[in-house]
Image (cartoon, rainbow, N blue to C red):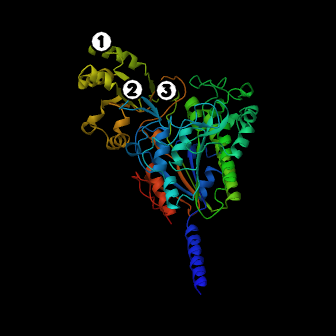
Amino acid sequence: MQKNILFLFFFFLSLSAKTQNTERPKLVVGIVIDQMRWDYLYRYNRYAQNGGFKRMMGHGYSCENTLISYAPTITACGHASIYSGSVPAINGIVGNTWIDRQTSRYVYCTDDKSVKTVGSTTNAGLMSPANLLTTTICDELKLATNFRSKVIGVALKDRGSIIPAGHSANAAYWYDGATGDWITSSYYMNNLPKWVNDFNAKKLVNKYYEQGWNTLYPINTYTQSSEDSKAYEAKGLGGNTFPYSFKQFVGKNFGAILTTPHGNSLTAEFAKAVVINESLGEDNITDFLTVSFSSTDYIGHSYGPNSIEEEDNFLRLDKELGELFDFLDSKVGKNQYLAFLSADHGALQAPEFLKEHKIPSARLDLNVFDTLNQVLKKQFGRDSIIIDMYNYQIVLNTPIIQAANINLDEIKKTIIQYMFYLPGVARIFDINLLAQIPLNSRIREMLVNGYYPKRCGDIQLILQSQWIEGYSKTGTTHGLWNPYDAHIPLLWYGWGIKPGSTAREISITDIAPTIAALLKIQTPSGAVGKPIPEIIP
């Protein structure tokens, strides 16, 4: 009798667990397109296939007015905010790189000298999520399932893989451009799995190099782009016109693939290999795969949004996404996985392109800081008072200033007066006085959300609209509050998602809380966003 009671107890306990698990998808796939403006969904819609972006838009849900709620709008910040539901002021990821105020050292967002590279002999694997101060939605899924869920991050960029996967991930993999291999760090494991070594042994990079790069469709049909050759397009691939030949890179320059659509293809192939070899989505315990497509950013920086290169890149990425969804339908099952797609930031059109069409635009020459340091030396008697400008903030060398007993306010006043009248400077002020500066409320909120004191600078710089900073005279960049940098796509597809769209304003920080609500798990520890009610069944 007692045995029968125990049997029934465990039977119903097991049944209850299975019932609970069926309330979640088998797999969540988070897709981040590095440097994708929202308008690309419609700009390149004419030739887009029905399998990728159009599939998500037609059979899923589109949040048409999704905005980044902080500045600077930079890669590491975007990935951190999407997955943490938070802002740099809380999660601590204030840029790709910053200067630590306590040590005056440069810190890369995923730097970790306590770990070792796994998969190559380079230093490209000295990385971990240690600098991320909060949990991600992936961490919360692990906690909710008592760490039975598998979480794996994939991206060519280390920061695009490590940060989304969070602290407790089973693995994060990124690309070593020096070797052409996918690697990781000892934070996750001591040796690469056999399947990763087998994948690397294929040297797919060389295969892609043999293919070169020509336009997917006849080049004269690319009516959404400028002519093929423009002086402001980079020539890092041996030129800036189609067709591109990469045979000179075979077996040598493994990093060149980053600035081609083949980088996205390599990422998609590796993501599929992860699903197969790690058995993601094969049981009733929800797994999470984060995938960031990084080549869109490299191409955008090099050629600009109005280039044929960028148009062709997104048309090819559309096909890659369609094939990825077909693969997931086959491997995991239709409506058995939840997918979302967003971006970490957008980008401005190349300034020279805008000027060609009478739209005011220019580049702020950062060499101005060398001159400014000489001005400060003459007035205050010390070298290198300015360390650098990072994330649109001027960072002062506090130890030197304190040791010399120089008046900090006088230094700030001199810098602000010097730069105030420079072309392209819209505002420049002591960041500690932000509350007193007459600013548009949205801009003020974005700056507040981006400010974490121990990792931020002393003086805030805001450029005029259509201006960018940088030493480069080609391509474009991003990082400011403006819609071209801050308006990003947000698409939902698959498990539990009903077709539709909304033009209501939504924040990038709402993504993680929405996933938490769908999965019925806790929101990340620093989340400030809210679930999107239109998404929740």
Tag 1 residue: 378
Q: CA distance from mark 2 to mark 3?
A: 14 Å
Tag 3 residue: 355
Which residue is at the front of the view, 42 or 136? 136
Tag 2 residue: 424
Secondary structure under the numbered disc 2 in the rendered image = loop
Q: Dividing the picture into quarters, in which one does residue 227 lie?
A: top right
Secondary structure under the numbered disc 3 in the rendered image = helix
Residue type at mark 1: give it: Lys
Q: Residues within 10 Å of mark 2 (few under 14, many from 20)?
A: many
Q: Residues within 10 Å of mark 1 (few under 14, many from 20)?
A: few
- Quarter of the picture containing the N terminus is bottom right
At 70% from the left and 28% from the top, the residue drawn is 244
Q: Dividing the picture into quarters, in which one does residue 416 lie?
A: top left
Upstream in sequence: badge 1 or badge 3: 3
Q: Are marks 2 and 3 in contact (CB under 8 Å)?
A: no
Which residue is at the front of the view, 211 or 63? 211
